[in-house]
Image (cartoon, rainbow, N blue to C red):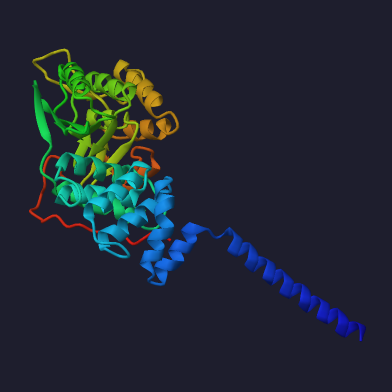
Amino acid sequence: MAVSSATNTMKLVRRLVLCLALVATQAAAGPYEDGVAAHDRGEYGAAVTLWRPLAEQGHRSAQFNVGVLYEKGLGVGQDFAEAARWYLKAAEQGDQEAQYNVAALYESGTGFPADFDQARKWYVAAIANRGTDAGSAAIRQRARERLAALPAAKEDVFPYDAGRFVVAHSDTQSCVIALQGTITRDTALKFDKVVQKTKQLGCDAPWLLLESPGGDLLESLALGKDVHFSHFRTVTRYECASGCALIFIAGSERVLMGSRAKIGFHQAATMSSNAARNDRHCSGSFDSNGVREMKRYVNWVMPERADKVIALIMATSCDAIEWTAGQRAIDLGIATSLVTEGIDIFGAKSSRAPTRQSFPTKP
């Protein structure tokens, strides 16, 4: 009898615990969760009624969801301008999906007046948004594809002795500086003028796109110091070698973009003082002035990985190039991120028609 009584007591305790858990769950639920449940049941009018007050109070996910319902005409009359308004509120709070949608609406002229500069601004924001959810990477990729398909940004060209700088910029203060050509003794001086131009344009944290086979060592180090001091972000789509590689590692962010992107290193070379002989020698010793300067520079721009990069440089003859790409570049600290798809930031590579995609409401 005592055993039966104890058993009944335990059953009662379990039921009580389950009831309390259910009550706690129900108590934790609120208007937002109730809106999700209503939406999942197809009761869109009820979902709007529950979400709109939250959206007006600044609830980011509620703002996004209200935007979706207006765009699709679920529970409310379809209204693209109202959808755009709510997406923009969520985007301004850092919602990546909303940022993508705002860009797509500006691109297509739906809900907003067509504005490629605004579309470019919000695609860039979605790409820079490092969300951790499973769909974040997919959103970034779609944004990159759409960004690549937009008309080219405005360009200013600054030629120098053996190449040129190209400044691509938009009205939304997004800028990219491209270094194209061999690095010579007037490259760093011209770069100073280019940086001044980006400041006049009001550019916000420009990228430096590097497309160079390298060149003069000391000039490359001087330019790399400017890049590091100014917190430029560096990116390459193709081959960036020798002095170009030293500039690349000075970036606050360092991106390899596309399957052909790679960074090449080798020892410095010195020329004989006898011009008639035109002898070229590899500086394989740490005692040479150029190597000492290079070593100090690498230790300064990437102190945590400097030893490995310096060893890589000194182990490679000046008549060869040791290429690094993909995960190896990440492991060595040479690059900070990889972007596998090819993108031409100076213009679309295809004539793909713009497409607009909306995302499901947030759970």
Snapshot quadrant of residue 155: top left
Q: Residue at x 38, y 40 (%)?
A: 332
Q: Residue at x 31, y 23 (%)?
A: 230
Query: Which one is in front, 57 or 130?
Result: 57
Q: Tell me what residue is drawn at x 87 percent, y 82 percent.
A: 5
Report the quarter where the C terminus lies.
bottom left
Residue 17 in the image: x percent, y percent? 72, 69
> Quadrant of the image for the N terminus?
bottom right
On screen, residue 17 versus residue 237, left or right, reads right
Q: Is residue 349 visible?
A: yes
Locate residue 361, reporting x and y percent. 36, 60
How many marks on residues?
0
Where's residue 56, x and y in %? Answer: 40, 47
Left or right of 228? Residue 12 is right
Residue 280 versus residue 28 in the image, above or below: above
What residue is rendered at 82% in x and 77% in y? 9
Query: Relative to 236, is 1 on the left or the right?
Result: right
- The single residue placed furthest to the right in the displayed view is 2
Whether residue 259 is visible: no
Res. 205 image quadrant: top left
Residue 99 lies, with reference to residue 271, above or below; the image says below
- Toward the bottom, the furthest residue is 1
Residue situated furthest top in the rendering: 273
Looking at the picture, tell me which residue is in the foreground, 215 or 97.
97
- Nearer to me, 205 or 179: 205
Q: Say if 361 sits above or below 328 in the image.
A: below
**Camera-nearest residue between 186 and 288:** 186
Name which quarter of the figure residue 281 lies in.
Answer: top left
